[in-house]
C-alpha cells in the first residue's frame, strides 16, 4: 500500500511500509516571489500601461500611427504573456511528464509526447534558456527559464536526460 505525502511543497514521495523504500516521484522548481514579480507582473503592468497610453493618445490625436499600433499590438502581447506562459513561475517534473505553471494556468506535457520534440537553446549572455516543445504555436510550447530559478542546473540536466536536444 502506497501513501502519498507532500513535504515542503517541493517533493512528493511515495512510501511503502518500509522506511528503506522511498523514491522521489516529483520535483518542483520555483522562482522566488521577487523573481516571479519582476519576470511576470512588471512586464504585464508595462504592457497594460502602453495599451492605456495608446488609447489616450488616439483619443487626442487619431492620426498618429504609433497610437494605433499600440492599440492593436498590446492586447495580443498581453494575451500571449498570460495564456502562453512564456515565463512560468514554477516547473514540476514527474515520471509521467512536465508541468509549467504561471498566472493560475498550467501547461502539461507527457514525456511520451515530447521525447523528441523538446529543444533547449542556451542564452548565456541573457542568463536564460529557451525551451520549445512541439510545433510552433502562438500560445504555448515556448518557455523562458532564468538561471535564477531554484534548482536550475538540476532541471536542465533532467530535461537533457529526458531527451531534450540542446541547440
Image (cartoon, helix red, strand yellow):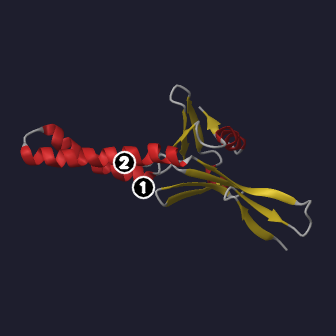
The answer to whether 131 appears left or right of 18 in the picture is left
Q: Position of residue 64 (x, y in %)?
A: 11, 38
- Total marks in image: 2
| Whole-percent x, y for residue 139 in the image | 43, 52
Q: Where is residue 144 in the image (x, y as percent from the top left)?
A: 51, 41
Residue placed most toward the observer, 34 or 108:
34
Residue 35 visible at all = yes
Question: Which is closer to the viewer, label 2 or label 1?
Answer: 2
Position of residue 55 in the picture relative to residue 96 (left or right): left
Instruction: Please name the residue shown 57% across and 58% down the image.
Output: 108
Q: Is residue 139 visible?
A: no
Residue 69 location, quadrant:
top left
Is residue 18 placed above or below 87 in the rendered structure? below
In this picture, residue 139 sits left or right of residue 127: left
Find disc 2 in the rendering and name its residue: 44
Q: Residue at x 68, y 40 (%)?
A: 160
Which of the 4 quarters of the picture holds residue 124?
top right
Q: Which residue is drawn at 66% across and 39% down?
A: 156
Numbered circle sitting on residue 19: none
* Residue to which mark 1 is pinned: 83
Element at label 1? helix
Inter-mark Cα distance, 2 to 1: 12 Å
The answer to whether marks 2 and 1 mark residues whose Cβ atoms lie closer than 8 Å is: no
Amino acid at each position: 500500500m502506497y501513501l502519498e505525502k507532500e513535504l515542503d511543497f517541493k517533493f512528493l514521495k511515495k512510501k511503502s511500509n518500509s522506511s528503506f523504500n522511498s523514491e522521489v516521484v516529483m520535483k518542483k522548481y520555483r522562482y522566488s516571489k521577487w523573481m516571479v514579480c519582476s519576470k511576470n507582473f512588471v512586464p504585464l503592468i508595462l504592457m497594460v500601461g502602453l495599451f492605456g497610453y495608446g488609447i489616450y493618445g488616439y483619443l487626442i490625436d487619431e492620426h498618429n500611427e504609433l497610437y494605433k499600433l499600440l492599440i492593436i499590438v498590446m492586447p495580443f502581447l498581453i494575451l500571449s504573456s498570460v495564456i502562453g506562459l512564456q515565463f512560468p513561475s514554477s516547473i514540476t517534473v514527474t515520471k509521467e511528464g512536465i508541468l509549467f505553471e504561471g498566472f493560475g494556468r498550467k501547461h502539461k506535457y507527457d514525456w511520451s509526447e515530447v521525447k523528441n520534440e523538446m529543444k533547449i537553446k542556451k542564452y548565456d549572455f541573457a542568463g536564460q534558456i529557451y525551451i520549445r516543445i512541439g510545433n510552433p504555436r502562438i500560445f504555448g510550447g515556448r518557455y523562458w527559464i532564468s538561471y535564477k530559478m531554484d534548482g536550475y542546473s538540476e532541471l536542465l540536466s533532467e530535461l537533457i536526460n529526458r531527451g531534450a536536444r540542446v541547440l
